[in-house]
Amino acid sequence: MNAATQASSQPSLMSRLAASGAHQRLLAFASLIVLLVVFSVASPNFMQMSNMIAILQATSVNGVLAVAATIVIITGGIDLSVGTMMTFTAVIAGVILTYGGMPLPLGVLGAIATGALCGFCSGSFIARMKIPPFIATLGMMLILKGLSLVISGTKPIYFNGTPGFDQISRGSLIGNILPFLPIPNGVLILFIVAGAASYVLGRTVLGRYTFALGSNEEAVRLSGVNTGSWKVAIYTVSGAICGIAGILIASRLNSAQPALGQGYELEAIAAVVIGGTSLSGGRGTIIGTLIGALIMAVLTNGLRVLSVAQEWQTVVTGAIIIMAVYADMVRKKEV
Amino acid sequence: MLSRRTLLGAVAATAMVALAPLAHAEDQLYIPLISKGFQHQFWQAVKAGAEQAAKDFNVKITFEGPDNETMVDKQIDMLAAALANKPAAIGFAALDSQAAIPLLQQAADAKIPVIAFDSGVDSDIPLATATTDNVAAAGLAADKMAELIGDAGKVAVVAHDQTSRTGVDRRDGFLNRIKEKHPNIEVVTVQYGDGDQLKSTEVAKAILTANPDIKGIFATNEGSIIGTINAVTELGVKGVTIIGYDSGKVQKEAIRNGVEAGAITQNPVGIGYETVKAAVGALKGEKLPKIIDTGFYWYDKTNIDDPKIAAVLYD
């Protein structure tokens, strides 16, 4: 290294970091465009408004879960309970609205608060009881799965008694204003959640500690920061976001399906990873995750529209995950 | 930089090459079937029937279902993708009929005929439902049980669940027939094993241990009967008449070697076949019956290799 680069090392590091983030997003975004083009060429039925809406609709729940998972993964943790936590909050909304007959906003708030409480528990297991995140959230996943079944009596809870509940996800505010663009509210909510999470990660103290914990937790602790409290806070926020996902899926199905949820955590994690967030923590973006979730949904939908046999759809999805992460590795070595 | 571009290019190129031939031959009518499952042998048999009908009526079908029967939202995404392909008609086995109604309505508005299969949809939209009369089929199981145990004594039921249509129909079909026609038979208990082989084993063991004088057990689906077979084998119990449902390798083996007395089989191949046939009929403007009973059979050691029976059994 010569003197000139030494002198400019500070700004150049910054610009390199910025550039790396941009690259990462660019790569994921380019893959998304490639997929869209390939499917459009391969089938005339792919690129139509109703199908694009179907893809966005399919992204909404997984996208919100993936946002929740991203925050936790950036700290170097993992959350295996996002899927069943979503289900649990949906069941709680069902209890409040259908069994309790309470007004709609209470059900929504109840679900989000329940998610936050669950996240608080996971965070406490991890930060206070020193249980590794994988184990703590695996335990949570099973606890919440079981509780959903117990509370609901293993039967779906329908929201027919709460008019307007299904409109949270199925309705379209945008479509009311712009009739040619009937984007469902669920998609709108996904973008709002993603925007808010992106703001929190980029512009707030909580966001800075999220990255710092993932980069070097020990250094953060030694500099006098109460890492435990911040970690609990991060898991709590993540849990609240799962609560929003719970409302979204319950509204979309107009019912809380207590047995659903397991397996959804892996899809969320896949979206996070495709979006370029590192599983070892310290690096990641919400926009990347959003693109990752869109890639998953486009891929699934596109292969279906092309009538690819279902066995092969699964194979292709797996291959794409590996390729996406490999491409990211290649990029990292180059930068 | 270069390697990334190459990589992306390679991805795109491979995808193009792999997918291009699939950009369809558009002359055939396209009828997608959205099922409740995909990996179970039962659903594969339904698929086989649908494919046979597709060949016979010269239409193109696809057959898809979620990984398990809890994934209601995935099934709806599948239905949405199927609708995007502008199908001529749709076959649909609803996991939750309420959740699917907006999309089914969309299909109805687009004048796409919907044929339900396996389990009904609580709506007027499907023109017909191709399904097994599970109540009658379980009633036949009750009659066979009575015949085999001398029309008297204690029996029990290992059921797969207490909420689904098939679970309720098979349980009640059996119980009601016993009550009506066989007053000397006492049903001591109905236990649920979720259709899970291991859970059903535990459930059946508990029944056998608690009731040493039990004469028969009826198990309501493949997982339940495999569990019951396991329980009888592991405990070494003799002289209990067990009757199952559906087929599968383990069950067929147990019937051949006498552990299991016999079973009711649905006609999954027929369900698939009739669904596609009804869809084609609807497109021709034929009047369809609301329920298409695809039939069921009793089979045991004596007729398991009968061509008519063997055709509807799966491994």
Image (cartoon, helix red, strand yellow):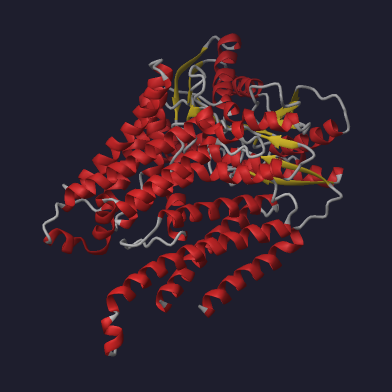
Residue A263 appears anywhere in the view = no
Tell which of B41 and A18 is nearer to you.
A18
Task: Choose between B263 and A86: the one closer to the eye.
Answer: A86
Q: Residue at x 54, y 38 (%)?
A: B73
Task: Classify residue A10 by image quadrant.
Answer: bottom left
Q: Tag count in the figure?
A: 0
Question: What is the x, y in percent for residue A25?
Answer: 47, 62
Q: Residue furthest bottom?
A: A2
Asked if residue A282 shows in the view, the reply is yes
Question: What percent of the width, then of the height, locates residue A74?
Answer: 32, 57
Q: What's the residue at 20%, 44% (across, down)? A: A124
Instruction: Note whether A23 is above or below B75 in the view shown.
Output: below
Residue at 66% x, 60% y is: A37
Q: Position of residue A48 (x, y in %)?
A: 70, 47
Q: Position of residue B165 (x, y in %)?
A: 58, 24
Horizontal side, residue A225 vs residue A93: left or right: left
Q: Is residue B185 above or below residue B273?
A: above
Q: Is residue B183 left or right of residue A64?
A: right
Q: Is residue B114 above or below residue A191?
A: above
Asked whether A211 or A116 is in front, the reply is A211
Q: Which sits in the foreground, A322 or B195?
A: A322
Q: Vertical placement of B173 versus B242: above or below? A: above
Residue located 65% across and 26% down the image: B120
Image side of residue B61 versus residue B41, left or right: right
Q: Is residue B208 left or right of residue A186?
A: left
Q: Which image quadrant for residue B248?
A: top right
